[in-house]
Structures are given as C-alpha cells and as structure tokens.
Image (cartoon, helix red, strand yellow):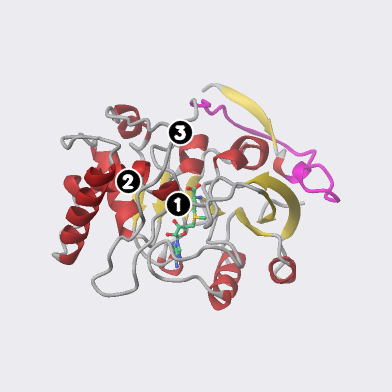
Amino acid sequence: MDMAVSVSTGAALFAGSPRSRACVARPAHEVRPPLVSPLKWAGGKRRLVEPYLRPLWQGHEHRVLVEPFVGAMSVALGLRPERALLNDVNPHVVNFLRELKRGLKITIPLLYDHDYYYAARERFNDLIARGEFRGSEAAQLFYLLNRTGFNGLCRFSGRTPQRFNVPFGRHKTVNFQEDFARYRAAMKGWRLSNRDFEHLEVGEDAFVYADPPYDGAFTAYSGQSFDWDDQVRLAEWLASRRCPVVASNHATLRIKRLYRKLGFRIREISVARSISCTGGREAAREIIAVKGFGR
Ligand SMILES: C[S@@+](CC[C@H](N)C(=O)[O-])C[C@H]1O[C@@H](n2cnc3c(N)ncnc32)[C@H](O)[C@@H]1O
C-alpha cells in the first residue's frame, strides 16, 4: 500500500500550543479538488477551509467528517472527505442536498425575473403547505429562490405552515448551474440527515466540524432560533465527543469563556463575512475552538 508520513499540523495553528512532533504513518489520501457549493448561504464557511480547516483535517482524512450544521455544504465540498455525515435542521436545504446526491436534473426554467421569482415562491409555499416539500420539484424551486432571492437568505415566517418570505434580490448577474453531475460523484460516500444536532450518532472514528448559528447573529435559518441555551447545549455536547472536534463561532466574551471552560483551545481570527443577516460583508471576529487533537 502507498504510505505517506503525515504530521499533525493542526495543533500548530493554535498559538501557545507546542507543535506536534509526532509522525504517524498513514495511507496517503488523495486531495480531491475543492468544489464550490451551488447555494449561497448566510454564514457559509468556504473562506475558512484552506487557511484553517484543511490543516486541522490533514492526518484525519480516514475519519468520517461529521457536520451537525452543514448549511450549503461549503466545508464538505472544500475538504472532499471520502465519508461524511452531514446534518442540518432545515428540511429544505437537506432536501436540496439529497436531490443533489441523487443527481438533480433541472426541468423548470431557471430565470432571473421579478414576477417569475414571486410565482416560484408561491409554488414553493404551496408545496410546503401540502407537505410536499421533499423531492425534485421543491429542490429545483429552492435552488432558483436561493440564487435569485435577497442575498441567498433562507427565512420563513413563524406561522404554521411556514412560508418562505425572502424578497426578490437585486443582483448584477445571476449564474445558474444546470449540470450537477460532479456533486453527485463527490457525495457518493456521504450520508445526509435532518434533525437537531444533539440526535446525531457520532462515533470515535469521526472528525466533527460544528458551525452553528453564531452567538448574537441571524439564527432563524429554519424558522427556529438558536439561543444562548442552545449555544451552551452545543458546547457541552461537543465537549463530550470522543473524537477530534472543531467549532467556529463569533468571538464574543461569553462564547470564549464557555469553550475555554470546557477544555477547548481557542484561536481568534478575523474573516470577511460571506453574508450576514443585513446583507453586509464586513469583517467579523470569530473563533475556532478545537478539542481532541492531543497536545
Ligand atoms: C452558519 S450556518 C452553517 C453554514 C455552513 N457551515 C456552510 O458553510 O454553508 C448554521 C446552520 O445551522 C443550522 N441549524 C440551526 N439550528 C440547528 C440545530 N438545532 N440543529 C442542526 N442544525 C441547525 C441552520 O439551518 C444553518 O444551516
């Protein structure tokens, strides 16, 4: 078997932690070219992949990448693991990802037009009201609304049945993809799930990357908010996983305190936001917290 020596570089990303000198012989893992998500997503983490997440993932490629908050899948598509468990509580994004894995075919016109947008939104909301929001038509409408709505936001009114209420977006250009074959191939060994993060089964062979709604930010991706109790519930859940865990969040004082108290090492970084709730793209202070990488 082709063997390569991999050095645990992840620890070196964290100031104050001694760089790991331990060399572990592991099978060489093919680095597959990153793919870009077909969706826009508030809080998408494509920009974190190369500078911060890939160095942490290196040497762990044999593990199952578990993303409890997968959103638009930017991290999984960046790292391209062989095996992954990707979860989100938002049933519409998960339906889209499931259809992508099945080899989504576009059969509706993909147009960037004000009246067409509102007709598509109405049809999408009808499907939701009838409980028919799973399957190819809903996924195609979701894709159209995501590309042509305001900032790619995914927001619902609180009423039951929920209604997608994002207005038409003003974009200079809109590029649609119609051929999703490469995603189908990339997602072959990946499982998708749609539940609250706490119900995920995470084995010791996992590598968890958790990217929850940020403390103090837009949190209503699915009509439910993610409040401070959820942040605490998540940090405690992550701390008790028996595998390497990486989490990102806003660098608020209480988040830093919470993760430190639970034994995480923290690095503070400044990243340009992909999309914030106001549509702003200003830089934000964030943290990357890690646990389970050894010293
Ligand atoms: C910051 S976004 C993740 C973005 C993703 N990392 C990306 O790069 O596209 C947070 C995600 O958490 C999901 N979410 C919110 N509450 C959740 C919960 N209790 N369990 C699982 N997912 C949840 C939201 O639907 C949203 O997609």
Q: Nearer the viewer, residue 81 or 232?
A: 232
Task: Judge: label 1 CB < 8 Å from ligand 1.
Answer: yes
Q: Nearer the viewer, residue 157 or 184?
A: 157
Mark nearer the N terminus (2 vs 1): 1
To which residue does mark 2 refer? 97
| Disc on res. 70 | 1
Left or right for 248, reference 225:
right
Q: Quadrant of residue 256?
A: bottom right
- Can residue 190 be seen from the camera position used here? no
Q: Quadrant of residue 229?
A: bottom right
Q: Residue at x 51, y 42 (%)?
A: 75
Does residue 15 belong to the magenta stretch? Answer: yes
Q: Main secondary structure of the magenta part?
A: loop
Place of residue 16 in the rendered image (x, y in percent of width and height, measured from the top left): 86, 51
Labels 2 & 1 near each other (Cβ < 8 A): yes
To which residue does mark 3 refer? 36
Task: Single out the residue that lies furthest toward the top.
Answer: 2
Per the rendered image, the range of residues in magenta is 11-32
Place of residue 127 in the rendered image (x, y in percent of width and height, measured from the top left): 16, 58
Task: Single out the residue that lies furthest toward the bottom.
Answer: 229
Task: Judge: label 2 CB < 8 Å from ligand 1.
Answer: no
Q: CA distance from mark 3 to mark 1?
A: 14 Å
Q: Amino acid at mark 2?
A: Leu
Q: Residue at x 28, y 39 (%)?
A: 113
